[in-house]
Image (cartoon, rainbow, N blue to C red):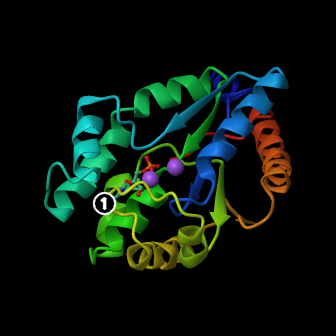
């Protein structure tokens, strides 16, 4: 029945944060860890630059192409929508997804350009809702001091400050703030603990929502 189909589903775990917050390394560490626990797990990321839409996004981010702010916003969202069916199928089949950025980045970055926050949220409604959002909390200044901004469009401290404010206004009950200035190993163990708990909840019948 409908209930049984959701039992032992995978968890949708999202890592969010500013550029240089350490998300990507924590995503791969967490994925490897869950794998060693015998779980079915995959690392995903948005934007997914491998699709046709993702390639347009990539040329926008590297400033090879310009696009109207609203248009690129919808394109980022469409890039999540084009993966929706696969995401849901994986989750229902019991695979946990560790996702590097999701709708929160979608809203926080676009609204930082001056687009209305609620308008930015609208196209995200209906996508699978994360079971856990781990926000790697670091100030834009501290992130910039880490160096290594790759020169992509949004990688400027003034812009990231606005993104930071937007992220803070998007926090909901699925969020856990994690102080991203802690050591990489401390972060890793906090993230492991939070992830295992939510994977357990999902395996025990917590339903997938939208
Ligand atoms: P990444 O590949 O994680 O470094 O992301 C590329 C950049 O795009 C990064 O600065 C964050 C930004 N970004 C990610 N998702 C979205 C989105 O949905 N909308 C907008 N406007 N920007 C996004
Ligand atoms: Na980036
Ligand atoms: Na990243």
Q: Residues within 10 Å of mark 1 (few under 14, many from 20)?
A: few
Q: Is residue 107 left or right of residue 167?
A: left
- Residue positioned 17% across, 48% down in the render: 64
Q: Is residue 35 left or right of residue 14?
A: right
Q: Is mark 1 within 8 Å of ligand 1?
A: yes
Is 139 placed above or below 151 here? Answer: below
Tell me residue 116's x, y (percent): 29, 76
- Residue positioned 72% across, 27% down in the render: 7
Q: Is residue 183 left or right of residue 63?
A: right
Q: Quadrant of residue 141?
A: bottom right
Circle 1: element type: loop
**Would you name the residue on which mark 1 appears?**
153
Tell me residue 155's x, y (percent): 40, 64
Is 10 placed above or below 174 here? Answer: above
| Front residue (pair 148, 30) | 148
How many marks the image carries: the answer is 1
- Quadrant that contains the N terminus: top right
| Front residue (pair 15, 187) | 187
Is 174 placed above or below 39 here? Answer: below
| Front residue (pair 105, 174) | 105
- Residue positioned 38% across, 65% down in the render: 109
Q: Quadrant of residue 6?
A: top right
- Residue positioned 83% across, 54% down in the render: 190
| Front residue (pair 88, 44) | 44
Tell me residue 150's x, y (percent): 42, 54
Tell me residue 29's x, y (percent): 73, 38
Q: Is residue 46 left or right of residue 123?
A: right
């Amino acid at each position: 029945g409908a209930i049984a189909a959701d039992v032992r589903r995978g968890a949708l775990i999202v890592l969010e944060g500013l550029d240089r917050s350490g998300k990507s390394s924590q995503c791969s560490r967490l994925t490897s860890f869950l794998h060693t626990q015998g779980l079915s797990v995959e690392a995903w990321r948005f934007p997914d630059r491998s699709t046709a839409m993702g390639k347009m996004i990539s040329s926008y981010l590297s400033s090879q192409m310009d696009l109207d702010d609203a248009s690129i916003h919808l394109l980022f969202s469409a890039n999540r929508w084009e993966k929706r069916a696969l995401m849901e199928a994986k989750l229902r089949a019991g695979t946990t997804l560790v996702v590097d950025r999701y709708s929160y980045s979608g809203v926080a970055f676009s609204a930082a350009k001056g687009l209305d926050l609620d308008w930015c949220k609208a196209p995200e409604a209906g996508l699978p809702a994360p079971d856990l959002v781990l926000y790697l909390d670091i100030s834009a200044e501290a992130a910039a001091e880490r160096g290594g901004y790759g020169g992509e469009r949004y990688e400027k401290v003034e812009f990231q400050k606005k993104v930071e404010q937007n992220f803070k206004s998007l926090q909901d009950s699925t969020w856990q703030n994690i102080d991203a200035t802690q050591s990489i190993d401390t972060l890793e163990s906090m993230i492991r603990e939070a992830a295992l708990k939510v994977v357990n909840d999902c395996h025990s019948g917590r339903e997938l929502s939208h």
